[in-house]
Image (spheres, grey):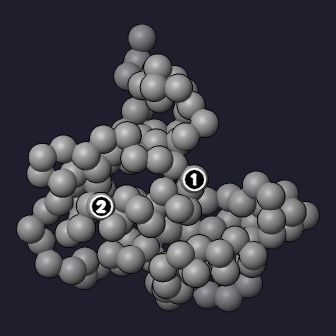
Amino acid sequence: MASVWTELVIDCREPRGLADFWCAVLEYTHLEEDQDGDVLISDVRRTPEERRAGGHPPLLFFIRVPDGPKKVKNRLHLDLTPTDRPMAAEVERVLALGAARVDIGQGEQRGWTVLADPEGNEFCVLRGAADQ
């Protein structure tokens, strides 16, 4: 059997704060926080066994690193697709949670909007079924 993707690790300066942001965006919950303040979050709608078995969105693990602020564009990013509202409404909801609009040269009139989380990590909100 091939490997199963179970976790996405995100280096950050403030794991708790960034984990709180992503919990609000994705409706995830904190699973554990270790003695170093690193935080693991996951989908609240899955059992612990389902979370570790794979075949579902990965756990997000926020690890404290001593680096300064992020300086260059991500080489890997998350794409989010709203399930119950148009893209524009989801963008506004996520902005209200602490995201910021980002211009990485994407141009206008795209099927996505580029945002950044509170530590500057880019991610995209895509058009969903409500935009059809």
In the image, residue 25 above or below residue 43: below
Q: Which mark is residue 119?
A: none
Image point 67% across, 80% down: which residue? 92
Nearest the viewer among 33 and 69 is 33
Image vertical order of residue 1 relative to residue 66, above or below: above
Residue 4 picture location, percent across and down: 42, 25
Which secondary structure lies at badge 2? helix
Q: Position of residue 102 (x, y in %)?
A: 49, 85
The three-letter amino acid code for the residue at tag 2 is Arg
Can residue 105 be spotted in the picture? no
Residue 84, quarter of picture = bottom right
Asked whether, in this view, residue 126 is left or right of residue 79, the answer is: right
Q: Nearer the viewer, residue 125 or 2?
A: 125
Q: Earlier in the sequence, mark 2 or mark 1?
A: 2
Residue occupying image coordinates x 41% and y 32%: 5
Label 1 environment density (alpha carbons within 10 Å; few <14, some 14–19, many ≥20): some
Q: Name the residue tied to disc 1.
A: 27
Q: Which residue is mark 2?
A: 16
Alpha-carbon span between mark 2 and mark 1 = 15 Å
Is residue 80 in sight in this rendering? yes
